[in-house]
Image (cartoon, grey):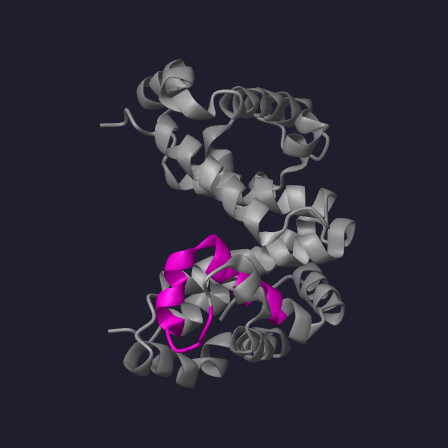
Amino acid sequence: MQRERILGKTGTFLSFPATKTYFPHFDFSSRSRQVRAHGKKVADALTLAVNHLDDLPAALSSLSDLHAQRLKVDPINFKFLSHCLLVTLARHHPGNLNPEVHASLDKFLSYVSSVLTSKYR
Amino acid sequence: MVNWTAEEKQAISTIWAKVDIEKTGAGALSRLLVVYPWTQRYFSNFGNMSSPTAIEGNPRVRAHGKKVLTSFGEAVKNLDNVKATFDKLSHLHSDKLHVDPQNFRLLGDNLIIVLAATLGKDFTPEAQAAWQKLVGVVAAALSRHYH
């Protein structure tokens, strides 16, 4: 699966413009290299998460630290990205996102989001 | 008054023209009930919702999904007056149905996922952006008379 390309196309910045406030230095034109590179970073982290479903807090511990101490991204934004990821998957695999698969993915992304914000306070 | 660009209005109506209201409505509501099972609390008299298959085949769910999406269509037809369009429905959801407004947002986002799954590449990122705005406007209109 072309993970990086799918994440690069995830229209989070387009649908939820406030998310751009975390990347004031970015070029947001379509095909932006910065957006695609960042999409790849996120895709790699999600791949790591998928491979550690049974010990997510441990696997994502340093990313949790990073988000709590440095990035401080408001938790709502994880919801926006998760939603756009699901939309993009649905768009690219129209037949495959049936309700049960959707529910599992939503649950997974919710859990990843809560782990990444778990050290906020 | 919501400010719609010509492109946004175009994206919304182009997508809407491709929507099978009965199928998409039924699909969006049943998916909501499967993915967010706690939403079933509002439909305790709808009969068998014991599994995703039961939910997706439930005739009352399907009928209600069609009803909800038909109503949503009123927003599409009245983009410049969504608030007034949902005046009565807002009172109904608040005073009679006692539905948590968060559910309007959940259903709206869910509808968008169904549109993407149904229309594939036709549901462009620009189309999604316009529809995110629309579902937000509808959710706000329905929430307006809560007190």
> In this rendering, would B35 be left or right of B69?
left
The C terminus of chain A - image quarter: top left
- Give x and y (percent) for residue B113: 60, 53
Among the 4 quarters of the image, the one containing residue B100: bottom left
Decide which of A60, B33 is in the foreground and name it: B33
Task: In the rendered view, tell whether residue A61 sits above or below residue B10.
Answer: above
> In this rendering, would B108 be left or right of A31?
left
- Give x and y (percent) for residue A55: 40, 21
Q: Main secondary structure of the magenta part?
A: helix
Among the 4 quarters of the image, the one containing residue B62: bottom right
- Give x and y (percent) for residue B118: 71, 57
Residue A49 falls inside the magenta stretch: no
Residue B44 falls inside the magenta stretch: yes
Task: In the rendered view, tell whether residue B67 sits above or below residue A56.
Answer: below
Give the magenta range: B25-48
Let me know if residue B133 appears in the view: no
